[in-house]
Image (cartoon, rainbow, N blue to C red):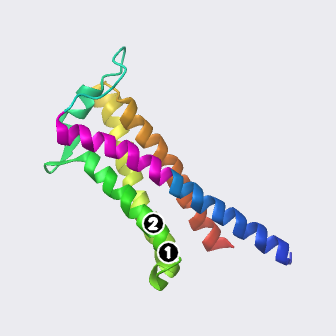
Amino acid sequence: MASFTDDDYKAQDGRDALARRAQLILVVIGLVVAGYLSYLKIADAPAVCVESGPFDCNVVLNSQYSELAGLPIAYLGFAVYAAIGALLLLENRVDFLGQWGTLLTFGVGLFAWLFSMWLVYVQFALLQALCPWCLSHEANFSILFALICYRVYRESFS
């Protein structure tokens, strides 16, 4: 059985801190993208978008799938990024989140990632139109969710 030295624990803490910082950076990127998409809904403005071939942001952003129960999907995306950011920022300050924050983040992230993958399907299969802004959000969130899974794995099996 392997034994861990102080250096092993320091390296592990360093990787965990790096993963947490990377998550926070991805949250900020997500807030910018979701904020822009939310602005487009609020201002009823056309998106700055490459419109050639399969790319047509306005078809995607104005489709029936761009809202859920009358609430724009962009608002939900912004709220999810804000919630994950808050969980990350507070997990070292609130005892409950120190114990359960990573698992709560995983739950929120799992639901949001599955919903994002459904939205990718909608763009490709149902609308047959793609929005680079939406796809960048979904790629960003996929990377964020992978880091969330990494942290859950590290906390569960370390």
Disc 2 target residue:
105
Q: Nearer the viewer, residue 79 or 42?
A: 42
Magenta region: which residues?
A: 26-44
Q: Residue furthest bottom?
A: 95
Q: Secondary structure at mark 1?
A: loop
Q: Position of residue 3 (x, y in %)?
A: 86, 78
Q: Position of residue 79 (x, y in %)?
A: 31, 57
Disc 1 target residue:
91
Q: Is residue 60 left or right of residue 134?
A: left
Picture residue at 44% right of the left edge, 62% below the top: 85
Q: Position of residue 4 (x, y in %)?
A: 83, 76
- Which image quadrant for residue 105? bottom left
Query: Vertically, is 113 above or below 58?
Result: below
Picture residue at 43% right of the left edge, 70% below the top: 104
How far is the residue under mark 1 from the one under mark 2? 10 Å
Foreground disc of the pair 1, 2: 1
Q: Secondary structure at mark 2?
A: helix
Query: Vertically, is 127 above or below 134?
Result: above
Q: Position of residue 22 (x, y in %)?
A: 58, 55
Neighbor class of circle 1 (other Cα within 10 Å; few <14, some 14-19, many 20+) is some
Residue 112: tell me if it is visible: yes
Picture residue at 26% right of the left edge, 44% below the top: 38
The amino acid pointed to by label 1 is Glu
Q: Residue furthest top?
A: 52
Within the magenta stretch, is there residue 40?
A: yes
Within the magenta stretch, is there residue 106?
A: no
N-terminal-most mark, 1 or 2 = 1
What secondary structure prevails in the magenta region? helix
The amino acid pointed to by label 2 is Thr
Task: Confirm or deny contact between disc 1 and disc 2 (CB under 8 A).
Answer: yes
Picture residue at 38% right of the left edge, 34% below the top: 133
